[in-house]
Image (cartoon, rainbow, N blue to C red):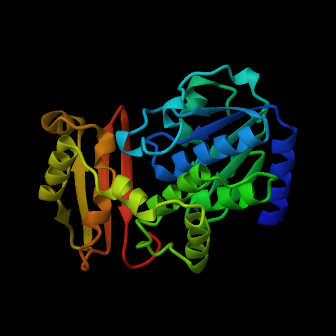
């Protein structure tokens, strides 16, 4: 079985040999998938590569402190690319582009799959999948460090935002010694960790707060200690919110010490999303 290091080496060879690269984030994007894709986009510019950022869903307003997030597209000419890099997609279907472009996952165009979820089904030509990593952006950091580029302040911002997002501000149990070591290196680039925290966790719209109130008011626990809440499309219309406004509330729900684990189910845009958290172990 190939080691992660060997996979990194093959990925770097593909990147160096490619001309036009498609950088894909998963549906209902969060700070990790966006930070990973944008950091790669900024890196590829230094290598004189042409790259395009793509995501099926709109980028939530709270991530607009990241550079270039307004450059994401939903449509593209798939045949114009000779490499695809997908970041933070825990399974092949999570980007949604396979529904729009039948050949998207055919591997006719090489795919580098970079992810940290144990659910990943290794859909790429090269699968850099490490469940021991706190975030996809940590893996992107290692990839960038192996390339002949400079980690600029903008790149560091994107990477640290992804780490901060997926560790819940370094509070989740996936936060490791390596997480802090990489974060420390990124802060040395001049990035404000407090600025990232403010943008990710300290800003909310009126509609988002109304939605959070609804979610908290409708929490339930069962005999097995599962704490849950459900939001339907009609509920979103009632409070004037979008499904993306539910982002972050599951972490607040997870502060109940007696809960075995916490589950938030959100319906929106024709999909149902389940968000799971626990204080005890890996949910």
Quadrant housing residue 228: bottom left
Quadrant housing residue 120: bottom right
Q: Quadrant of the N terminus?
A: bottom right
Q: Residue at x 52, y 53 (%)?
A: 32
The x, y position of residue 254, in whole percent, is 29, 68
Q: Who is closer to the viewer here, 136 or 125?
A: 136
- Residue 193 shows in this picture: yes
Residue 28 is left or right of residue 187, and the answer is left
Q: Residue at x 70, y 27 (%)?
A: 103
Residue 226 is left or right of residue 139, and the answer is left
Q: Residue at x 57, y 24 (%)?
A: 100
- Residue 90 shows in this picture: no
The relative height of residue 261 versus residue 94 in the rendered view (above or below) is: below
Q: Quadrant of the C terminus?
A: bottom left
Residue that protrudes farthest toward the front in the picture: 190
The x, y position of residue 80, in whole percent, is 75, 22
């Amino acid at each position: 079985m190939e080691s992660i290091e060997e996979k990194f080496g093959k990925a770097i060879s593909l990147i160096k040999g490619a001309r036009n690269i498609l950088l894909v984030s998963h549906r209902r994007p969060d700070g990790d998938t966006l930070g990973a894709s944008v950091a790669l986009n900024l890196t590829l510019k230094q290598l004189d590569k042409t790259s395009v950022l793509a995501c099926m869903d709109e980028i939530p307003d709270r991530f607009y402190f990241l550079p270039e997030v307004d450059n994401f597209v939903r449509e593209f000419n798939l045949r114009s690319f000779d490499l695809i890099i997908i970041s933070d997609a825990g399974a092949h279907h999570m980007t949604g582009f396979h529904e729009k472009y039948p050949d998207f996952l055919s591997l006719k165009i090489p795919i580098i799959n970079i992810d940290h979820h144990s659910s990943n089904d290794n859909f790429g030509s090269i699968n850099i999948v490490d469940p021991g990593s706190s975030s996809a952006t940590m893996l992107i950091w290692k990839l960038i460090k192996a390339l002949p580029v400079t980690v600029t302040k903008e790149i560091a911002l994107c990477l640290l935002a992804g780490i901060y997002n997926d560790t819940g501000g370094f509070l989740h149990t996936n936060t490791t010694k390596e997480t802090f070591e990489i974060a420390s290196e990124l802060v040395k680039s001049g990035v404000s960790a407090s600025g990232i925290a403010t943008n990710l966790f300290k800003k909310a719209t009126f509609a988002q707060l109304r939605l959070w109130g609804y979610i908290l008011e409708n929490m339930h626990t069962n005999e097995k200690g599962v704490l849950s809440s459900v939001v339907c499309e009609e509920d979103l219309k009632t409070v004037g919110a979008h499904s993306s406004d539910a982002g972050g509330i599951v972490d607040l729900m997870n502060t109940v010490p007696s809960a075995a684990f916490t589950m938030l189910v959100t319906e929106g845009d024709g999909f149902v999303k389940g968000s799971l958290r626990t204080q005890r172990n890996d949910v």
